[in-house]
């Protein structure tokens, strides 16, 4: 995610959530205040009515009509019940709002619990125990706070509208702030994206007034200069190594071949052949290293469609001239794969070197002079080549160092090598967007899986 979008997202979401929570808290507090205020008014209405009853002596019917005509604390949809000390109903107003649970409330009221409040849907219910003129009374009020709910509804509408307006303002402000903060970073990222290693460095002047971005700008310019200097040095080093090493090795091979011609001893000729093979192998490693260095320096490399199984057969044929007793067994999965699935686009010299390294490992570390190669195209858009041999496997602790420079495990202490083969192989496979993995599924079994994407 771009830094601009992160700033926009984090700032706007945080602000909107905080305000949203605050508005919810305001609404909840007002709702609690409405309920408490209305229930207090209900209590006052009960007490006022009780006092009125205790002071006026009329028959029950005339008393009820007189109280209902009072306008004191009038409430909408109210049901008011008043009981004497024996919990006998002495007053009920003319409203028809039912209170089916009045007996339960009366049972809960006493000198210790003189006040009970609860909800019945949208109605507020208040029950009190009250003493007037040395007489005990019970009062129950159930009423609907139309005025309070109207105010609560209007408050909810106001808060929703305010939240929407605030959200729009926050998003607009967030976009402005995000653009202003991220602009120099975006400019630097654009310059970095367009920059090509080796081109003439461009001095960047970012539109910023912050210390961090000025510092980053300065360091970026320094990095570009250092990268160009390192690139120039690498190019010169590559050419230097190419001329200084390739020529002596070629001369050495020629001398060995000349000595071989003049040698009469068969054993000596075989030894010379081995030395020639090792020298050629060193030359191929140098060529591979040079080629990889050029590619990593951004020079690119030639690619073409390569049929992997044919390339492997060629490698086996070359190795069998030196190791005729070693057997390579090749299997396909499925048994008769489609020909077009066995092709990989890449550099033939590099891929050949990668598989030569793997097959040479099989020869060096096998204990039965045999290796198995499985070419698997059963998975969609994937070509998997598994190289398996039987021999002392790499320990679990050593496996994490297997593809590092100059690493040689316990199983290679008596073997000839430089500890570079697997490193080169991994780099080559990586340059072709592939992967290589090592596993030992059973004791003394070594498996290298090379996986190419065929998309």
Image (cartoon, rainbow, N blue to C red):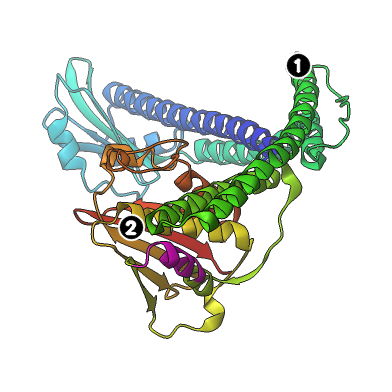
Identify the residue shown where x is 88% and y is 33%. Answer: 200
User: Is 322 inside the magenta-drawn segment?
Assistant: yes
**Quadrant (top left/top right/bottom left/bottom right) for the N terminus:** top right
Q: Is residue 213 left or right of residue 413?
A: right
Assess whether mark 2 and mark 1 are in contact (beta carbons under 8 angstroms). no
Q: Position of residue 139 (x, y in %)?
A: 26, 31
Q: Is residue 197 above or below residue 381?
A: above
Identify the residue shown where x is 83% and y is 17%. Answer: 209
Q: Secondary structure at mark 2?
A: strand
Identify the residue shown where x is 38% and y is 53%. Answer: 361
Q: Is residue 135 above or below residue 19?
A: above
Could you tell which of marks 1 and 2 lies nearer the N-terminus? 1
Rendered image: mark on residue 447:
2
Which image quadrant for residue 385?
bottom left
**Closer to the camera in the image, 22 or 94:** 22
Magenta highlight range: 314-324
Q: Is residue 63 left or right of residue 6?
A: left
Residue designated by label 1: 215
Q: CA distance from mark 1 to mark 2?
A: 50 Å
């Amino acid at each position: 995610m771009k830094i601009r979008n992160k700033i926009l997202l984090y700032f706007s979401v945080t602000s909107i959530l905080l305000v949203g929570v605050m508005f919810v808290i305001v609404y909840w507090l007002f709702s609690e205040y409405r309920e408490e205020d209305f229930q207090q008014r209900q209590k006052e209405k009960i007490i006022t009515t009780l006092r009125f009853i205790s002071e006026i002596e009329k028959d029950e019917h005339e008393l009820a009509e007189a109280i209902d005509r009072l306008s004191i604390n009038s409430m909408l949809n109210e049901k008011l019940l008043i009981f004497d000390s024996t919990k006998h109903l002495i007053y009920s107003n003319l409203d028809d709002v039912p209170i089916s649970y009045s007996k339960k409330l009366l049972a809960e009221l006493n000198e210790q619990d003189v006040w009970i409040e609860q909800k019945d849907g949208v109605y507020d219910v208040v029950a009190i125990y009250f003493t007037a003129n040395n007489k005990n009374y019970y009062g129950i009020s159930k009423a609907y706070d139309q005025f309070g709910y109207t105010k609560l509804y209007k408050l909810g509408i106001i808060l929703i509208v305010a939240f929407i307006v605030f959200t729009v303002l926050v998003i607009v402000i967030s976009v402005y702030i995000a653009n202003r903060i991220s602009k120099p970073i975006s400019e630097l990222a654009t310059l970095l994206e367009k920059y090509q290693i080796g081109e003439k460095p461009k001095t960047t002047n970012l539109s910023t007034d912050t210390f961090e971005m000025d510092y980053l700008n300065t360091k970026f310019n320094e990095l570009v200069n250092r990268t160009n200097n390192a690139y120039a040095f690498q190019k010169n080093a590559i050419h230097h190594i190419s001329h200084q090493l390739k020529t002596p090795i070629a001369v050495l091979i020629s001398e060995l071949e000349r000595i071989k011609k003049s040698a009469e001893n068969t054993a000596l000729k075989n030894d010379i052949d081995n030395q020639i093979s090792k020298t050629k192998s060193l030359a191929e490693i140098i060529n591979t290293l040079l080629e990889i260095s050029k590619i990593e320096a951004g020079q690119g490399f030639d690619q073409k469609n390569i049929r992997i199984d044919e390339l492997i057969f060629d490698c086996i044929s070359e190795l069998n001239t030196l190791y005729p007793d070693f057997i390579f067994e090749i299997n396909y999965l499925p048994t008769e794969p489609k020909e077009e699935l066995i092709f990989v686009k890449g550099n033939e010299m590099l891929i050949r070197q990668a598989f030569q390294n793997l097959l040479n490992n099989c020869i060096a570390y096998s204990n039965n002079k045999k290796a198995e190669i499985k070419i698997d195209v059963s998975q969609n858009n994937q070509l998997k080549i598994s190289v398996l041999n039987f021999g002392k496997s790499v320990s679990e602790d050593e496996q994490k160092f297997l593809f590092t420079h100059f690493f040689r495990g316990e199983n290679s202490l008596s073997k000839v090598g430089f500890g570079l083969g697997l490193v080169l192989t991994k780099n080559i496979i990586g340059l072709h967007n592939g992967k290589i993995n090592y596993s030992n599924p059973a004791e003394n079994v070594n498996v290298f899986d090379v996986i190419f994407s065929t998309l």
